[in-house]
Image (tube, helix red, strand yellow):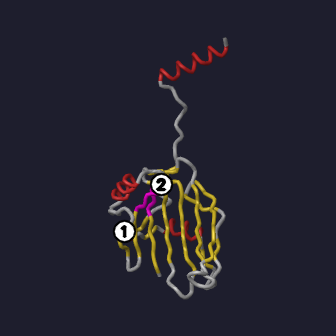
Amino acid sequence: MRLKFAFAIAAAFMTLGASAPQQTGVDVSGAVGFSDVKNCVYSRNTEAIFKAMLTQVGESRRWTTAPKISLGALSAATTRTMTKKDDVEPGGRLYEVTAKLPPGTLWHGLRLIEIYRLQTDYTEVDNFEERQLIFLDPPEKVQAAIKGLGVIVPFSPKYREVGDVGAMSIARQKIGASLGCNWGA
């Protein structure tokens, strides 16, 4: 009898349209941004986030990674991997750092799920750096949001040139899309 009553209550809620309360997200638009979006120049706060993710120790070939990054009201743990790239240069390394964000993190209406940084460390060949904001949203929605900030960014493999050696593009990911800025040196 109790089981029938429980099903009757559940059915009543479903027909009335009752549902669990929606979880509201944390908007990090103020903590993550650009000072010059057209040239992919991040704001001072955002630069601090990427620097915390990966910082070179002086002129050495050592790099440090903060255990967490802070995005205003929330923080996220970082994960770093290092791959030896002796095939490119003896002692060469490729560093990748990710910070997965909690569900509900929003950036200009987009569902931001991860912040990513890649950096090569070579002495004899040009280095490369990439920074990405990764979203759960499809590339078209990411492109529309970026256009709303005042810049048209193409889908990869096309790119928007920034500065002398930089590029900006939106790429399809396994889930969603990323806005990436990269530079050669």
Numbered label tally: 2
Q: Check if mark 2's residue and mark 1's residue have beta carbons within 8 Å.
A: no
- Which residue lies under the disc numbered 1? 159
* Left or right: where 80 falls relative to 12: right
Magenta segment boundaries in residue numbering: 170-179
* Mark 2 → mark 1, Cα distance in angstroms: 18 Å
Kindly identify the amino acid type of the residue bearing the numbered disc 1: Tyr
Pinpoint residue 131: horizontal percent, then vertical percent. Answer: 49, 67
Question: Is 117 located above or below residue 112 in the figure?
Answer: below
Question: Is 151 located above or below residue 1 in the figure?
Answer: below
Q: Dot 2: within a 10 Å radius of its alpha carbon, few (fewer than 14), some, or many (20 or more) residues?
A: many
Residue at 63% x, 59% y is 77
Pinpoint residue 87: horizontal percent, then vertical percent. Answer: 58, 81
Query: Magenta includes 10?
Result: no
Residue at 45% x, 65% y is 180
Looking at the image, which residue sits at the far front?
87
Question: Is 143 located above or below residue 80 in the figure?
Answer: above
Kindly identify the amino acid type of the residue bearing the numbered disc 2: Phe
Q: Nearer the viewer, mark 2 or mark 1?
A: 1
Residue at 54% x, 88% y is 124
Q: What element carries label 1?
A: loop
Pinpoint residue 1: horizontal percent, then vertical percent. Answer: 66, 11
Q: Dot 1: within a 10 Å radius of its alpha carbon, few (fewer than 14), some, or many (20 or more) residues?
A: some
- Which residue lies under the disc numbered 2? 135
Pinpoint residue 110: horizontal percent, then vertical percent. Answer: 44, 51
